[in-house]
Image (spheres, rainbow, N blue to C red):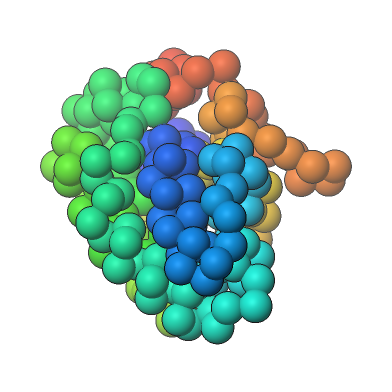
Amino acid sequence: MPFRAALFDFDGTLADSFAAIASSTNHVRLSYGLPPLPEAEVRGYVGYGLDKLMADLVPGAPVDEAVARYREHHARTMVAETRLMPGVGDTIRELARRGLKLAVCSNKRVEFTRELVVALGLGDYFAHVLGPDDVGDRAKPDPAMLLEGLTRLGVSATEAVYVGDMVVDVRTAHAAGVPVWFVPTGTTENGEEPDLILTSFDQLLDLLPFS
């Protein structure tokens, strides 16, 4: 059965937002007297939701308070420090032109993701942008967000593919029964392999023809 829809993770898949995430994380750390961390180290903790990121990287701080400080800073800086990953803009526009139904499913706070999608020039191409906020704060790897995305797009799990870059994306897709493809920057662990590792983002144009 040909694919009729593609759903995407955001951080590390569609956008390089790690500078912004590291900046806001270090803002919070400094507010608690902790030294800044390099972006590469912060990156290794991204993907499982902001509560876990703060719990892991701002040890000893009240999580709710740390999350609030992060969000206040991130809202002011994220647009300036976030860029599309190579090939994403042209590929997404072409997939939409071909008639593919497109959505984003990210563990980032959904209001941030929606603002960034628009700021990065992709607001006209995604039918839906979802986050944990849309499914009772059930973050990936819970499949609820991906299943909600399928429902909103009006497609079955076999008619869609999920594109991500982290092990949490593989686990989420497997739990939802959706094929999962990895961008080339992604990393896997034993037993958590995607169905396909892309050579580049624009390889999607060879794999997702006109619907």
- Depth check: give the residue in front, 34 or 208: 34
On the picture, is 109 further left or further right than 201?
left
Q: Residue 194 in the image: x percent, y percent?
A: 67, 38
Q: Residue furthest right?
A: 190
On the picture, is 209 further left or further right than 28?
left
Instruction: Work out whether residue 143 can be spotted.
Output: no
Q: Residue 73 in the image: x percent, y percent?
A: 32, 61
- Depth check: give the residue in front, 109 or 158: 109
Instruction: Work out whether residue 93 can be spotted.
Output: yes
Quadrant of the frame with the C terminus: top left
Q: How many marks?
A: 0
Point 32% across, 39% down: residue: 82
On the picture, is 209 further left or further right than 198?
left
Name above or below for residue 151 compared with residue 171.
below
Q: Residue 114 in the image: x percent, y percent?
A: 24, 55
Point 64% across, 29% down: residue: 196
Name above or below for residue 145 compared with residue 197.
below
On the picture, is 180 further left or further right than 112?
right
Name above or below for residue 64 compared with residue 69.
below
Point 24% across, 45% down: residue: 79
The part of the image, by quadrant, that contains residue 192 is: top right
Point 62% across, 34% down: residue: 186
Q: Residue 181 in the image: x percent, y percent?
A: 57, 35
